[in-house]
Amino acid sequence: MISIRNLSKIYGSAEGGHKALDDVTLHIDRGDIFGILGSSGAGKSTLVRCMNLLERPTSGTVSINGTDVTNCTGRDLARLRGSVGMIFQNFSLFQQRTVLRNVTFPLELVGTAKAEREQRALELLDIVGLSGLEARYPSQLSGGQQQRVAIARALANRAQIMLCDEATSALDTKTTVSILELLRKINREMGVTIVIITHALTVAESVCNRIAVIDGGSIVEQGTTQDLFAHPQSRALRDLIENSRQVHGRVSLAFEQEGC
């Protein structure tokens, strides 16, 4: 489905620039919910943005369904981005557009007739649980509702791949769970392959069937989520697991001290 080979990304000059990605190779199968896990600054967001060419790789290739898309431009690039939806941590909705018109926006770009694009948007809003809210504006929605609008918009062009860049980082725990359940439903019922960028072990563990761990711009291990969490081989994953335990320990202690 998505095949990345020897991918590197350097910001600035080749000699004195910052190497954000260093010879990354990985394969994401059709139907995966694939997690890319790493700490802040590890290269997660750069990697996912290279998948739909929001960032141009310095070297290496990105292939989707067996087609090398690394050098796509013009209409080919537009078609690629239509087939690969993306959602972000900050939702990236148009504040002056209603919910309905946020979802129809990708269809407007490709010239879909108004009646058809509005019908498609209403169907998607029903799928993401927002029926009846199509006339509202983003400022009138909760964070979780805004992310559901962003998910509906990402699916408007019948995308078969969805890239999620820290999509739940701005949400509380209960809302995060509901968004992850929605992503699992979309994967199961619509056959959408999902790539989740996250630093949160709980997100990766609860929804991803396979993960890759990135550190310093390089993939340091990859495999099934269950195997990697049970037997972490890299220092990066061991540190993430240990940090997660410490955070949970401090939270539990605070609750005990407060008598909760």
Image: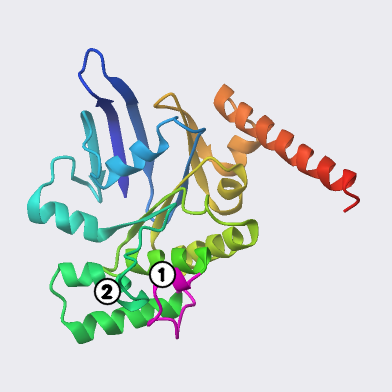
Q: Position of residue 114 (x, y in %)?
A: 19, 83
Q: Is residue 69 above or below residue 110?
A: above
Q: Is residue 234 visible?
A: no
Direction from residue 23 to residue 229 in the image, left or right: right
Q: Looking at the image, which is closer to me, 80 or 224?
A: 80
> In the image, which disc is placed on residue 138?
1
Q: Give the residue drawn at x 82%, y 43%.
A: 254
Q: Give the residue drawn at x 63%, y 37%.
A: 229
> In the image, which disc is placed on residue 104?
2
Q: Main secondary structure of the magenta part?
A: loop
Q: Give the residue drawn at x 16%, y 56%.
A: 78
Q: Is disc 1 placed on a helix, strand or loop?
A: helix
**How many marks are shown on the rendered structure?**
2
Range of residues picked out in magenta: 128-141
Direction from residue 76 to residue 124 in the image, left or right: right
Q: Is residue 145 above or below residue 20?
A: below
Q: Is residue 78 above or below residue 67?
A: below
Q: Give the residue drawn at x 34%, y 29%.
A: 24
| Residue 139 covered by magenta stretch | yes
Q: Is residue 141 above or below residue 27?
A: below
Q: Amino acid at mark 2?
A: Thr
